[in-house]
Image (tube, coloured by chain):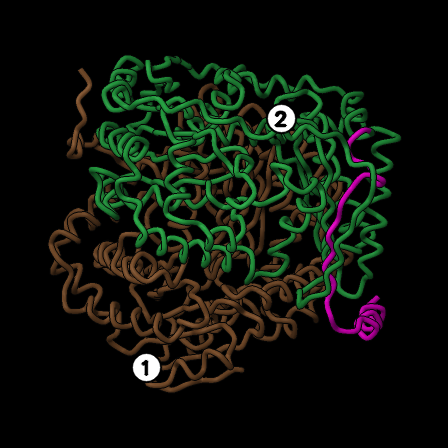
Amino acid sequence: MSQVLTTPPAVGAPRPWRFPEAVTTRTSVGTPVHVFDRPGQYVATVRVTIAMPLIAEPRELEGVATIMSRTLDEGTELHSANEFAAALERHGAAYGVDVSSDALHVEISVPVSHLAPAVALLAEAITRPAFNQADVGRHVTIRLGEINQERANAGYRAREAFASHLFDSSTRRSRPTAGTPDTIRPLTNVEVADFYRRNIGPERAEILFAGDATGVDAAAIIDEAFGNWTSTAGTALETPEPIYIPGNRVVLVNRPGSVQSQLLIGCAGPDRRDPGWGSAAVANHVVGGTITSRVDTVLREEKGYTYGTRTSFAAPRKGGTFSLGGAVRTEVTGAAIGDALRILREARDGLTEQEVQEAKDSLIRTAPLRYEQADSVAQQVGSNIANGVPVDFADTYLSQIAATTAAEATDAYRRYVGTDGLLVVVVGEAKDVRPQLEGLDLGDLIDLS
Amino acid sequence: MVAGMPLTYPIAEQTLDNGLRVVVSSDRAVPIVAVNLWYDVGSRHEPPGLTGFAHLFEHLMFQGSRNVASGQHFSLLETAGASLNASTFFDRTNYFESLPSGGLDLALWLEADRMGYLLDAVNQENLDNQRDVVKEEKRQSYDNRPYGDSYERLVRLAFPEGHPYAHMTIGSMADLDAASLEDVHAFFRKYYGPNNAVLTIVGDVSEDDAFDAAKRYFGHLPAIPTPPPAPDGTIGPMTDVQRDDVESDVPSDLITMMFRLPVDGTPELDAAGLALDILAAGQSGRLNRRLVRDEQIAQSVSGGALPLIGGVSFGTLTGIASDGVDLQKVEDALLEEIEKLATEGVSSEELATVQAQAERDWLEQLATCAGRADEISHYALLFGDPNRINTRIDQVQAVTVEQVQAAAAKWIRAAGRVQVSYRRQEAKSEMAETAGEQE
């Protein structure tokens, strides 16, 4: 009965899918609370997203937001750092913070059966931190060590050079989110506590729950913990528009001993305010968003230059970027850059109907997978809030994609990629790479070796 | 502590006539389905001279097969909305995709075509190309990052030459270079067949439909001759200390210790793993409290057990020294804590904490169809019992403080370890002074 089928079986139409709906309430002091009931998700995420544009940091103390964020759980008015960690972990909870250019996210993942005590501890860290100098000083030292690790990491070095050469120095994003040695060293608990007082409060926050809420009143548990949060911090400053540096140029960062060159090639891109945001994602998928896209078909599958590269349009609240990143063998660095630029520029001539349809299918049909886990719902919604778009922005994004034609995808791409030049960053063995860059028509060479 | 809820994920099993074990776990709450195959071939099966072969196939399996053109495996699945990949480990190789449930037949057809007819498409050209890609993977993942070769160094010391766990999955580039097309074909014929694999289907499909589909696409594939088992790696705890001291251009001084541990699937391994967690897991672990928070001699500490099936497992502890602190201090403190745990044991509070953390980790692992499918394949292939996903938490909770101390006393000892240390090449006296001034 079993016949060998020599052509692919048909794929059935996917069930309609929408981003999970929230029940939204407010705490007693007015902080919005969004509850996403996800049956079967026994580990819940509770995420507090607080508007915290990094322009609020004094220029000479950049990184203070990061040190403040990392020391929230290092002792509170009620518990020492060791006591706090022991109590939280005893409930099976994991705690984490993330600082982006627009917001602070503080979250716990915890089995739903331990939700209430874990949320109480989360609230304690956010609303009643102690900021002891011993703990702040330790985190300054740890951050300095982390900078050493970053400087040894080719991917990090490429991102740092990309930011500092794509953005004007008046734009905060031209410099590392977590600060540099000269801005980190002066920090004490005085500056950290001051930054906290000015910037963290219930008026800037939104609180998310995602998980199986069967038999659990998540909103009441959150209100119990956050309902008496008071602060003198009013509403947050609005992030200004970034200023980009246009033009073709190549930045060579020497990393002696490298056996590969880390590449990052890119330019300005749209953000979520742009109705072409979804079309840009479609174009990206065709050009370099996956292993079957135009770039890796050549660089990986035809030529074997790399383990893999990817392109992306990425954006915080205001002002996006386009970039192609990956590592290639040192000896073929020039050839790989040449191929990559040729493919990026040729894509401006037009993406085919078939390419665009396949990209749309992939992006739309993978949505249920992307948001299967409670934590991924909380991640997405937290980033939506930080980026200033509605909590269900995923539906808007997917409908933009569904409506995208091949011409619109090409247009969204052409508006950005290669229009005002491309910045090429190479991190590698400079003495071997430099001769390979000649004759590539990359614009000015900024040699940091 | 509140007892965790009992897990009741449904499990149904059938074995096809050709020996393919099929496990189905239906879950109609989500509109997606996960397909997951574990092949009983990993780096531990590779004989000398053929290291890196299991991993090489992880690449070749995406290069097309009899009815699938090169690149088509990815493009067909991506267009159907799939997330897909594969991975190679010491004990096995897995291939998997999750996608909207209307694509189940496509996923099974693609998996069956490459299980049965991969070699039609494996020629010198794509062998050469994927060998280049693997070399770039090795450069990216091992050679071009600080400490990237630490595990290679550690397993070489922790296990005797020729032991199944004495080499990493990426293998030797010299072995890959020396491989002929015929070597590669022979390796596939030896290990890739329905009777050397488990197929798991989880998600939006009924049990009956899932078994029918498995039979439809895999039923005609012939069984292969029973593959030779991997060499027996049974070996006891280390009885001496071996070091590999590296001077290199690293950002901070680092030490990693490795211990042999009991084989996977035993209460003794669970106990040893929990002992390492009590030392190294989370913010409240003993090493973080002492080395990072209190004495501030380390920037960070980490560690844990890596369960393995072939007669022995291993576990590690890692510390990165604070700037200006002699790495010897970190080593001494690690050894003191190791010996203290082995001789004085652990508190019930400490054990309950790491058990609660293990429970959350496990629930998170099962929170997606893909994660559940992978663990079902794991327990079906290596233990013959996929139902273990529902009882795993109970097993971990059953471990006692006495068992933790006994396992640690036997396996995690200062006198029975290997270690690799990385120290910066430059002179250190100057930095030590700088650090001293800050105090």
Compared with B117, A60 (above or below) is below
Residue occupied by mark 2: B264
Residue B435 magenta-drawn? yes
Q: Quadrant of the N terminus of chain A?
A: top left
Disc 1: which chain? A
Q: Is residue A311 left or right of residue B236?
A: left
Q: Are marks 1 and 2 on the same chain?
A: no
Q: Determine crowd level at label 1: few under 14, some 14-19, many 20+ residues with C-alpha closer than 10 A.
A: few
Q: Is residue B302 left or right of residue A368?
A: right
Residue occupied by mark 1: A440
Q: Amino acid at mark 1?
A: Leu
Question: x and y percent of residue A310 in the render?
Answer: 35, 58
Can residue A227 be seen?
Answer: no
Q: Colour of chain A?
A: brown
The quadrant holding residue A322 is: bottom left
Compared with A122, B19 (above or below) is above
Chain that is green in the image: B
Element on which disc 2 rests:
loop
Residue at left offset 40%, top offset 42%: B57
Element on which disc 1 rests:
loop
The quadrant holding residue B406 is: top right
Question: x and y percent of residue A332 in the render?
Answer: 39, 71
> How far apart, in angstroms, are the residues tagged by discs 1 and 2?
54 Å
Q: Amino acid at mark 2?
A: Asp
Disc 2: which chain? B
The magenta-colored residue range is B410-439
The quadrant holding residue A108 is: top right
Residue at left offset 44%, top offset 64%: A327
Residue B398 magenta-drawn? no
Q: Quadrant of the C terminus of chain A?
A: bottom right
Q: Are marks 1 and 2 in contact (CB under 8 Å)?
A: no
Question: x and y percent of residue A274 in the render?
Answer: 25, 61
